[in-house]
Amino acid sequence: FLNMAQLQYVKELLPSNEGGVINVEFDHVNFNNIHTLVYQTSGLTANSSGEIAKTSVQSALDTASGSSEPFMYVLNVSWTKSGSTYTVKFTRHNDFYELELNSFKRGTSSRPRYRHLGNKFIFTPIDTGASIKFTLLKQPKDIAYGSVNCELPEHTHKKITEMAVDLAILSLRDSELSQLTK
């Protein structure tokens, strides 16, 4: 229940399409609740198709964090070329090809764009010499009694414990309810 609660806690801080206004980077207070899970990868380079495999990004995160939990959320992508660093703008799949046809909006060396597919990131323009860094929110380590503590900051532990108790109570009610319906 503690593992489910800490994961739920982090997910509640992520932006959603369900009308919430919470955003992990809304201000320093929100960010302080999960800062221990945020890592920046070392520079990666795209292949000749402008792609970086998700496994390469995960390996870079594993090296940066010293653990192997998957990333949950891409906070930022930056691109460094010839000593200058630029933010890489996420592009929705529905808009990508239309933007590529527009000479004012397509990705350039100083305004690169990326798309995220199931197993890779695709960058435009294709530039195998650009150094690409990801700032990622990783999933917290599973809490294991006696060996792994909660990775989140200490001030979040009370809330996570309360959430775990609520989840445990809910599961007890569900089992009682199923007994009544039999």
Image (tube, rainbow, N blue to C red):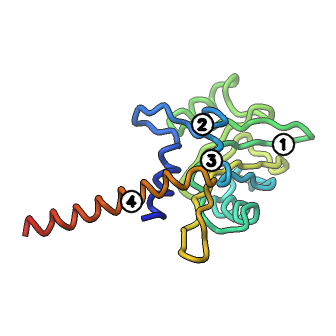
- Give the Cα distance between marks 2 and 3: 13 Å
Q: Residue at x 60, y 71 (%)?
A: 148
The residue lying toward the viewer, choosing from 117 and 7, is 7
- Give the Cα distance between marks 1 and 2: 19 Å
Q: Residue at x 63, y 51 (%)?
A: 137
- Mark 2 or 3, closer to the camera: 3
- Give the Cα distance between marks 3 and 1: 18 Å
* Crowding at mark 1 (Cα within 10 Å: few <14, some 14-19, many 20+): some
Is residue 13 found left or right of 182 in the rendered image?
A: right
* Crowding at mark 2 (Cα within 10 Å: few <14, some 14-19, many 20+): some
Could you say which disc has been placed on residue 80 in the image?
1
Is residue 179 found left or right of 170 in the rendered image?
A: left
Q: Tell me the quarter of the image containing the N terminus.
A: bottom left
- The residue where tag 3 is placed is 74
- Mark 4 or 1, closer to the camera: 4
- Give the Cα distance between marks 2 and 4: 40 Å
State the image coordinates of residue 48 (x, y, percent, origin top left): 75, 54
Judged from the image, the secondary structure of the residue bearing numbered disc 2 is loop
- Give the Cα distance between marks 4 and 1: 46 Å
Is 166 rendered above or below residue 180? above
Q: Earlier in the sequence, mark 2 or mark 4?
A: 2
- The residue where tag 2 is placed is 91
| Callout 2 touching callout 3 (CB < 8 Å) | no
- Mark 3 or 4, closer to the camera: 4
